Amino acid sequence: MRGSGSAPVAVPGSERRVPPGARDLGPVLPTATGHVSVFVRRRAPVDRAPTRLRLLERESFARRWGASEDDLARVREFATASGLEVRAESVARRTVELTGSLRTLEQAFGVRLRRFAHASGTFRGRVGPVHVPAGLAGVVEGVFGLDDRPQARPHVRRFRGPLAEAATVTPTALAAAYEFPAGTDGTGQCIGLVELGGGYRTADLATYFGGLGLAVPSVTDVSVDGAANAPTGSADGPDGEVALDLELAGALAPGARIAVYFAPNTDQGFLDALTTAVHDTANRPDVVSISWGGPEPSWTAQAMQALSSAAEDAASVGVTVTAASGDQGASDGEPTGTLAVDFPASSPFVLGCGGTKLELSAGAIASEVVWDDLATDGGATGGGVSAVFALPSYQSGAHVPSGPNGGTGRGVPDVAGDAAPETGFAIVVDGATVALGGTSAVAPMWAALVARWAQALGAPVGDVHAALYSAGAAGAFHDVTDGSNGGYSAGPGWDPCTGLGSPNGSGLLAALRALQSSG
């Protein structure tokens, strides 16, 4: 390792393995250019005073809890000594972006980079940990971008029968059934969407919103790590995810602005997208919706800790983060069938969103059960108990069961909403109207509800966990007590299928108001 000045040390949790079934194609081209993001510690621990009563402006947060100038300088010195170029740095995002040849990056971080072929395509990978100089131990919390394997999958499901046979729900009917607060539409708020592939067509937005009698919302694209709005032309690819997020969030909060953060589907892209959204002083999203993820075992510990830390930062500046809990039941698609929960929904600072099958009659809820299509197409709401994150204090009375490792961890999800493709949403994507569902629909739904709450409160909502789990909110959920996700069964109160249940939006707003007044 060049420029170290002392013996290198491994970055905790940075170990990588070759995915099962991957084929080694040989070494990388050493002269090719690479780009890494070095994520560093906060200058001081975040004040974890509960809930949303001590929120900071983004600029104030950067000065108080962002990276220290000294730590950034130490990373710059290391980069210069190693022959790397500093492309950008951010105190708020706690990130230094470095570029250099792959050979230089290998030497600087003590890794060997090779090319691999996998079912998901070819990627640049590594085995073992990343190393930094001993003088940066404890300063650097993660190094991302050396390995560019696909990290996450979209949690969207398409109804495979004829569109006419789907009992799709309109956004207007959904908002009425879930009692979104009257007199609100998200005006003055911004919803951020994290997208790790695909894109949307403006013509599709015009068709969709025109069909609902709504104006097309203000949409701003934000490029992260060189990614951009890039439709693939297939509704079965990531375009379906992007369209579902955009159209559902825009229809449920038609007065809100939308910022779409396009990033590569890597752990680096995921982290950079979230930190960019949280600390975006131009668009200033009030809530960030994430419909991408993967089972906890598929992540490195450094990636989970960094993304969870970024979500904790979000809570401190009043940004709520919602995330889909996964679409493959209690195993989350793990090949061995073992129980696993989806990340980032399993972060204690993220509102995990599970799925139901909703049936309406005369505009009211006639039936709502756990979304479980495992027997027909393998789809079902994700949920269970984290093997990584400890039980948070707000779930202390939720009776979360022991996890698959025998420990008591964070329970997933927190909340739920309509996700079954059969009772999902008619979405316009790549010029066609298709019925889409999945927990991907639930994350933007809750994001739209949060935007409408923020409008009603005249203040950001931030981390809503304490309010949602409080006694004052107990009667403001539609408790889903029937069904299973293949590993857990629903029951009264919180459960590892649908969490606390689907929302009574007006009732939950009252609980938030009570919390606001008590502070």
Image (cartoon, rainbow, N blue to C red):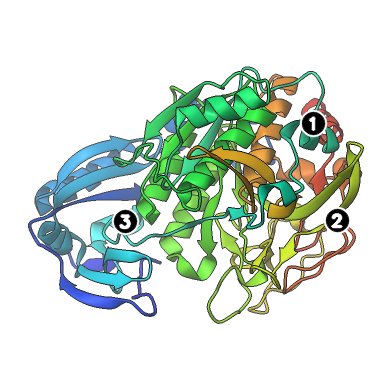
Image quarter (top left, top right, bottom left or bottom right) of the C terminus? top right
Q: Position of residue 444 (x, y in %)?
A: 63, 40
| Residue ID for mark 2 | 480
115 or 464: which is nearer to us?
115
Label 3 belongs to which residue?
A: 143
Of badges 3 and 2, nearer the viewer stands 2
- Which residue has dot 1 on it? 180
* Label 2 or label 1, whichever comes before in sequence order: 1
At a point 63% along the width and 45% down the height, the residue shown is 443
Spot occupied by residue 407 in the image (x, y as percentages of width and height): 67, 75
- At label 3, counting other C-alpha atoms closer than 10 Å, the crowd grade (few under 14, some 14-19, many 20 or more) is many
Q: CA distance from mark 2 to mark 1?
A: 18 Å
For numbered disc 1, what is the local secondary structure? loop
Q: Amino acid at mark 3?
A: Val
Query: Which residue occupies the foreground of this view, 414 or 357?
Result: 357
Q: In this orientation, does residue 496 appear?
A: yes
Q: Between 283 and 227, which is closer to the camera in this rendering? A: 227
